Amino acid sequence: MAHLYPRLLNAPAKELFAKYSTEQPQSLAARVTTHHESAVYVATGGDRVSESALRDLRDKVVELAESAGYPEPPTDAVAFDRALASTLHAEMQLVPAEAASRDMWAFLALCLLPDIAFWRFPTPPVDRVLGTDLTRHVYGRLWWRAQLVHDSRSAEPYGALAILGEAAFDQIYARRTALGGSPTLVRTILEVWRQLQASGALTGLNEREVLRDFLKRLLRLSSFLSFDAISEQALGAELHAVAVESATAVRSAR
Amino acid sequence: MNSRRWFSQPFPPDGASAAEGIRNQLGRPELDLLTVLVREAAQNSWDARAEGLNGPVEFDISTWLVGAGRMPAWRDALLSGAPETGDFPLRQRLRPNEPPLRVMQISDRGTSGLGGPTRADVVTDGPRDFITFVRNVGEPRDKELGGGTYGFGKGIFYLLAQQGTVLIYTRCQHPSGAYETRLIGCTLWKSYEGVDPTSHARRRYTGRHWWGDVADDDVVEPLVNGDADTLAERLGIRGFEGDETGTTIVVIDPVLEDLTVDELGDYLAETMVWHLWPKMLGKDGAEAPMTFSVTCDNAGHQVPDPRSFRPVDVFVQAYDIMRGEEAPLLACRNPVRDLGRLGIKKRIMPRIVPTRASTGVDIEESLHHVCLMRPAELVVTYYKGPRPPSENYGYAGVFRGLESMDDVYARAEPPTHDAWHWSMLERPESTFIRTTFRRIDEQLSSLFELETGAGESSSTFSLGAASSAFASLLPGGWGTGGATVSKAPNPAHTRRKVTQKNSGSGRQAGTGDDSERPQPSRRARAHARAAIAGPPTLEVHAGSAVLVQRFTVTPAVEMTVRAILSVGLPGSARESDPPVGSDVPVVSHWLGPDGVEYHGTSISIVGAPGEWELFVVPAADTVTEIALQATAAVTR
Amino acid sequence: MRVFPYLLPSEDCVDGQSWTMLVESEPIDLPTALVDWDYHFDLKLRRTVELQPARIRRESGLPADAPLDLAVVWNASGSNLSGTGTRHKLGSGESEACDLQLELAGADLGGVLTLTTTIVLASRLDDSPPAAPRRAGSVLWMDEVALRLQGDSAQFPMAVIDFGHTNLPPDAGWHLQITGGLESAAMGALLLLINESHEAVVGSFESAARPKPAQRAILSAVRADVARTLIEYSLECEDFEVAADYPEGSLGSACSDVFEKVFDGRSVADVRLLREHSPGLFSSELQARTSLFREI
């Protein structure tokens, strides 16, 4: 069942952001609320998330943060993000249409979990908190990462999160619109990449450089290829060929 | 004439407050008089805590019957100069055939005592406690973040005394370091018409009477030091030991409602817990800020420990939560202002057995209350929240206003300090009070999900149609309904097609692509134009793919035509950062209408009518984007 | 101008007919916008495409056995997701008619939905002739339609729940839940709850797009009751004023608006008195102005 989340619209979100930017992350714990006067919900389409569900979500996230060192700076931000991505995705009962709302993520970062947001990104730029760019939002980007890679058929539905580091993933994610926002495509890219790593085709190369080149090639191709129109198998073969082109080109350019 | 006697205040020609007016200043308290007494007296004591004192403020209430052996001393002292009128009832009460006289002594130690000048017209920078307590009425508080506000609280002593008479026995330390004890009697009853004892003229009296050393100018000064101590001892009033300072107030013949003395002791002790428990808590390892004791007819009545006394213990737990870091800070959004912190403790609890004291704060069988307090941490009231859905659950909350908001909350309190009324304030301050309660309600309603209940729907049909049909009830504002998009034009139902002509003939191109680039000048541009004639075509020449772009130019103009070639990316983007070692499209050659071949990315020509062709070698596996830019040759 | 890196078949090789959408198993022409869409609104779409597979291959320079797919790809601007709607392998005959059918889950959509019908090379052809497509997914033909699902028009917040699981009266048909004060956002403060176990009411809401007469009456009654509840709520708020400067989209401004519509120009105090002293008249005035049963 889909949960509808409260949304903090731009004006009150900006106001809170300005206010919280001058406060210590720990003092934000006292600002935590499951309710905001200006918050709105989409009119229909699900059940409004209960305040107890919001509190449970908060408890789980705080627990993750504490095991990552909160309130001290995170010991391993990458591991924290990965764990948070699967927690958010598994717990929130969020449909993509709802998760695409920037205002919903602003509520999460400013009302429900401001302390953790400002701890994860001390003095954050506005897009980390307000959701102006979901590929950058402290929580939203993680949910979407999980959404794009998770495979409910797998024993480890979120296993693919570990294939690429955050920076590398961001490269894919940032080109999401251009590459069609297709979970199949993202999963196939990750799968091809895993094969490439396993086959040794990347040995001795700067993986990030190869990935960047691979994505550039995909971007070129996407102006006349429709990745979603073909079978996953054909897509895998095509992407593999493109990735090999990249690896070869990067290797010969050295 | 004995100078140690009563003096009744006559109305001066320019008027004064009548006693009734002063008695009424406390308003009509909703709480019973004994509760108001406990609250107001303890608050006064707290506000009077001695600075630099390490120990707690000690607060004691005792009551006893004046023994037959001591009665003469009481009569001696208090009948002297007592006005002969029915409007001074103490006189009658002290008669020998009356029932035994009960007194109630409210004393504090570890407080500063009523120091400062004894006359209201003396100007001083130091304390003025004696004057504000004994003489004046309605002076604004001088204690930052104190519990009191306008000094109406002392009125309770007079209301409680059945004849309106109290004795005030106090010890203070002067700035010089010297100690001084003072004893003065005060009556506040009602205004009356009487006879002046000296002139025997009839005159109007205010109903305020003082007992003490009447000075030559008819101002009543307190008995001091030895005189005071001796009399206090004869009357059986608690004295001062060592360097103790503080105040003892003796209420003569107090109203006991319908309580027996034993019940009275228990009631006072319990009332102290209900109303003063924050002052009984030792915080962060320190000892409690105040200690409390009750003695009735020599029997001590234990004041319960709030940490174990049900259900006050739940409020103590909420209080601890409120002081923790996780306690929510309630805030008002418009205007923006932080209000205070709230701690809530919810737990399974058996039914409460109501007592007189708990009933007094409107807590009966179930607990669903929030204790409101200001930074002084004196209980204002127990605000009732929604009843928990199950009888087995209860909750207690503690809301403490921020120091920055103390003034607002203080001014929202009636003289008895037992409520916050938004109606007592103007906007925006009234908004802060209203919002406080609203925020508390919100926090409470989320406790048990009182709002929606636990239900999750199982039906998954769309309510969109119904929702739109009801939309007229919600004009304006935010929405996501599909009916309109005011900002962006409706892109709906557009059809885009991939088209590519494989032959060069056909339609006339509407516009050239040249307008995108900076132009040398309006004039020159008007004279040099390369207009693309239809989409480029893909042809195979000598086994390789070649793109052919046909175009026309402005006849007879000398110009440079430049090919701008790029790899097209999704949307209308052009590639600026190609992959490693990848091809980019390049110009193969140009062909004029006369069959002359040109080479290079840009060519200088004189415009000839007819069809020109540009041949491009595309980059493998890319969409090629071709644009032309024509620039007139510089002429003078 | 753009040019693809391979030859494309001429346009008349493909004739794509219009899209239709199934509403309660009845096909209707695909509109440009769905006013009533929400996350529970799944879409059932259909279209027939007639094409000439052999000619398409020929004109693209592809061998006669080149694998081609006819596919529908969807993309929703709301969720920023895309995916395959349906895929169909093309035969090798001279002409073929394909019935495309797809079902899209509302949960994945939102914003503007774009449906792209496309013919692509289904798998890589490493030895394809020059100027012919060789990469899997190469687009040979496509067209697009767009359907707006979400815009910015107002909707009234509603949800269906079983009152039996709440502390609401289990036999009530609906309940207007109002949380928060007049300053709070109406889209957060209001929620019309429909009792799942009240068949007549829940059925009316389900069929609100095409209600039967009895259902229309129920909807009218609920609507009037919601207006009434808002009015009574306003009257109970001691600080409610029609002229007060409530924030845009707030409960206060919604209440003011309803109040104005019903008690045009009358003061709040006046209406409070009316309600107190002439509850019957108060009720009838409400009934008249909320258009109770007028649509029937």
Image: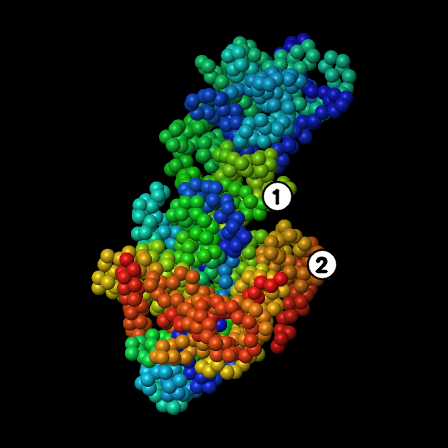
Q: Quadrant of the C terminus of chain C?
A: bottom right
The numbered disc on residue C266 is 2
Q: Toward which corner of the image does residue B197 lie, by quadrant?
A: top right
Q: In this view, does C128 lie to the left or right of C32?
A: left
* Amino acid type, mark 1: Pro
- Residues A244 and B140: in front is A244
Tell us which disc is closer to us: 1 or 2.
1
- Residues C227 and A145: in front is A145
| Residue B205 image point, x, y percent | 72, 22
- For the point 50% across and 14% down, the residue is B233
Q: In this view, does A168 lie to the left or right of B68?
A: left
- For the point 55% across and 56% down, the residue is C185
Q: Toward which corner of the image does residue C260 lie, by quadrant?
A: bottom right
Query: Helix, strand or loop at disc 1?
Result: loop
> Which residue position is annotated with label 1?
B428
Mark 2 residue crowding within 10 angstroms, few (<14) / some (14–19) / many (20+): few
Q: How far apart are marks 1 and 2 (CA)?
A: 27 Å
- For the point 71% across and 25% down, the residue is B16
- For the point 62% across and 57% down, the residue is C253
The numbered disc on residue B133 is none
Mark 1 residue crowding within 10 angstroms, few (<14) / some (14–19) / many (20+): few
Query: Do we see residue C116 in this rendering?
Result: no
- Residues B359 and B593: in front is B593
